[in-house]
Image: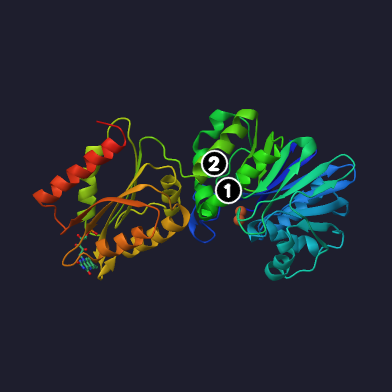
Amino acid sequence: MKTVEVREVLKDLIVLRAVDRDIKYFESLWEIPEGVTYNSYVLRTSEGSILFDTVKHGFSEEYVDALRRVTDLRDIKYVVIQHMEPDHSSSLKALSNLSDFRAEVLGHPLTAKLIKSLLGIDVKFRPVRDGEVLRLDDITLKFLHTPWLHWPETIFTHIEELSALMTCDAFGAYSVPPYSISDLTLLRTDYVKYMRKYFVNIIGHYRDNVVKALDKLSTLNLKIELIAPSHGAVLSGADVIKEVLNLYRSWAEAVPKDKKVVILYTSMYGYNEEIIRKLLSAVSKDNVDVKVFRFTSYHRDNVSDFLGEVIDAKVIVIATSTYDNSVFPITKYLLEVLLSKSNAEKPVYLITTYGWNDAASRELKNILMKSKFKLSRELSVNSLLTEADLQKLNDISKEILTYLDIS
Ligand SMILES: Cc1cc2nc3c(=O)[nH]c(=O)nc-3n(C[C@H](O)[C@H](O)[C@H](O)COP(=O)(O)O)c2cc1C
Ligand SMILES: [Fe+2]
Ligand SMILES: [Fe+2]
């Protein structure tokens, strides 16, 4: 069912959120059984309404109906397009076809070109400069260029009178949460994991730009009491705002959590599985937070979750096999997205198994050498563990525990 919910976030600020529980792969890549929302916002002013972003096509009809319940389309003075990815921009096409839609579209200078190439429509468009202020009678908007969060044309908008920051993808999350979160306990439930997962999957490749955007926000000293992203919940309350700003910086800098180990393994016939079973029984101490991701004949974890967990891991273990004189294909893919989204200076322990020639080991070492990851130790096993391999595995577990400060 296509639902577009309407809720008042603050007096005069209304969220219209399209709820997508049917989606399986966000961007046709990332597994999200938790679903996602696409949020658009209407700000009512004495001089007319301002619309921030729209929702994904497929929801356009329900979205336009919901919008009509909130405002007369003729009263929409501006549409601020903060990001042109179609999950946010594509219902602009449906709006532009309506005779009672007359709004001027505001966005980054690059947006004009993308409206034409992605939507194929002509609209009244005005580019906004970084730091440009738009004053209406009772409302002051400040536009900030925040490139690469998540595309080059991304902007944030600060609404001075509401101390609200409209951030599109940034501070967004997967899942269909309560429409507003103002309580730390609620934030710290699964929601923060969905936020981290979304961050890594979508903006992980551009983490340096996240740091720049956060620095820009603190330099400008903007009053932020509410963050309104275009996926997930609206965030408010001093504690929540402070925590999400801090979390965003720590994820952008891939700051590790003290005792967190992420283990990734593939196993066709159980050789790697057996090795990981032994490693797990050695490192699974009470206070060690171990997250295991399996790719086997009977189980496949989500790549999207794996990437989300890696960003704040302290240690990573990869165990996989040689397949057709190369690295096991799924591992190749996992490494490719890992290096694109979560490339960070973290120690990696590499375990490879083979039958007659360990091509996986050679290839993976080459890949890791070109990344920021630091190869700590490696273990190459001719399928079944020998006594000498067991000794090396034991050394690896001990080294991991020492690194985690656990004796
Ligand atoms: C389809 C298939 C292809 C394989 N290709 C190679 C290979 O090219 N070179 C090699 O040394 N071993 C090869 N092997 C052997 C595996 O790498 C080895 O048995 C490994 O221990 C399997 O570990 P796993 O069961 O944890 O996946 C292959 C095994 C399978 C099933
Ligand atoms: Fe995006
Ligand atoms: Fe998005």
| Colour convention of the picture | rainbow
Q: In this view, does 34 lie to the left or right of 270?
A: right
Does any portion of residue 306 appear in the rendered image?
yes
Residue 93 location (% of width, % of height): 74, 64
The residue sitting at 81% across, 51% down in the picture is: 68
Q: Mark 1 or mark 2, which is nearer the start of the sequence?
A: 1
Amino acid tagged 2: Arg
Ligand 1 quarter of the rendering: bottom left
Q: In this view, does 135 lie to the left or right of 223?
A: right
Q: Position of residue 405 (x, y in %)?
A: 30, 32
Horizontal and vertical percent for residue 46?
89, 42
Query: Where does label 1 land, which residue?
Result: 210
The residue lying at 84 percent from left, 57 percent from top is 103
Residue at the spot of label 2: 249
Q: Quadrant of the C terminus?
A: top left
Asked whether residue 11 appears in the rendered view, the answer is: no
Residue 343 - label: none
* Residue 147 image position (x, y, % from top left): 64, 55
**90 or 299, nearer to the observer:** 90
